Image (cartoon, rainbow, N blue to C red):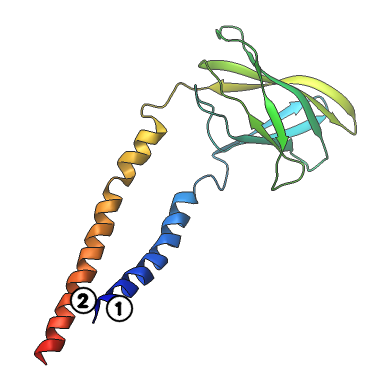
Amino acid sequence: MNKQQSYLNWYISASVLMPLLVLVLTAGGASPLETQNARLGPYQLLLSYYSLPRVGQSLNMTIGAANGAELQFSQATLVPAPGTDGNILRVQLTPDSDTPGLYDVAVTPPVRGNWYLHLTVSGSSGAVTGNIPMIVQGPPAMPTWLGWSIGLLPLPFLIAFIYMQIVARNRRKETVKRAV
């Protein structure tokens, strides 16, 4: 087996392994970690948390009607509950690009404790303003970037090991071919 065919085998192996690696690394976040039902006036809401509310981390959640009704959300803020030492934060609500009727919630809580998601909901029964309680947890014990770095540390060594095994196998095949 010549060097060109060796590289061809390596490229074929890499082209098979890379989509699998991408699939594994992007599989998280496909379904919510936690859901919460809330009621504001006549409206039943469903909050889907794709990341738990934590200090210093962007909150990844969606909000929508639990029964499929068409609702509009506006004037959203994150208000500290009594006993939580924090300031009122503006919450960005944007329509979800994948699912009509859902809104993506973007805010980064700065302080641990009890908070209220204060917002106005408009629908067929009129506009209602209210609070949805949420608990913001402390920062994780290990930063996310450090956890991913530690978890992926063996990957380059594994790829190098597989590549060396392929090269060694191809050399053995060449040696056998020359001997015959």
Please say if 109 is above or below 7. Answer: above
**The quarter of the displayed image where residue 150 is located:** top left
**The quarter of the displayed image where residue 131 is located:** top right
| Circles 1 and 2 in contact, beta carbons < 8 Å | yes
- Dot 1 or dot 2: first in sequence order is 1
Badge 1: residue crowd in 10 Å (few <14, some 14–19, many ≥20):
few
Outermost residue on the left side: it is: 179
Label 1 sits on a secondary structure element that is helix
- Residue at 73 percent across and 37 percent down: it is 64
Q: Quadrant of the N terminus?
A: bottom left
Query: Nearest the camera: 99 or 162?
Result: 162
Is 158 on the left or on the right of 13, as rendered? left
Residue 112: percent from left, percent from top: 50, 16
Residue position marked by numbered label 2 in the rendering:
170
Residue 157: percent from left, percent from top: 24, 53
- Residue at 41 percent across and 66 percent down: it is 15
Q: Quadrant of the C terminus?
A: bottom left
- Residue at 61 percent across and 25 percent down: it is 107
Number of numbered discs overlaid on the protein picture:
2
Residue 7: percent from left, percent from top: 30, 71
Please say if 79 is above or below 12. Answer: above
Residue position marked by numbered label 1 in the rendering:
5
Residue type for callout 1: Gln
Is 138 on the left or on the right of 37, as rendered? left
Residue type for callout 2: Asn
Is 174 on the left or on the right of 131, as rendered? left
Kindly identify which numbered label has been placed on residue 50: none
Residue 116: percent from left, percent from top: 65, 18
Label 2 sits on a secondary structure element that is helix
- Residue at 49 percent across and 46 percent down: it is 28
- Inter-mark Cα distance, 1 to 2: 9 Å
Q: Nearer the viewer, mark 1 or mark 2?
A: 1
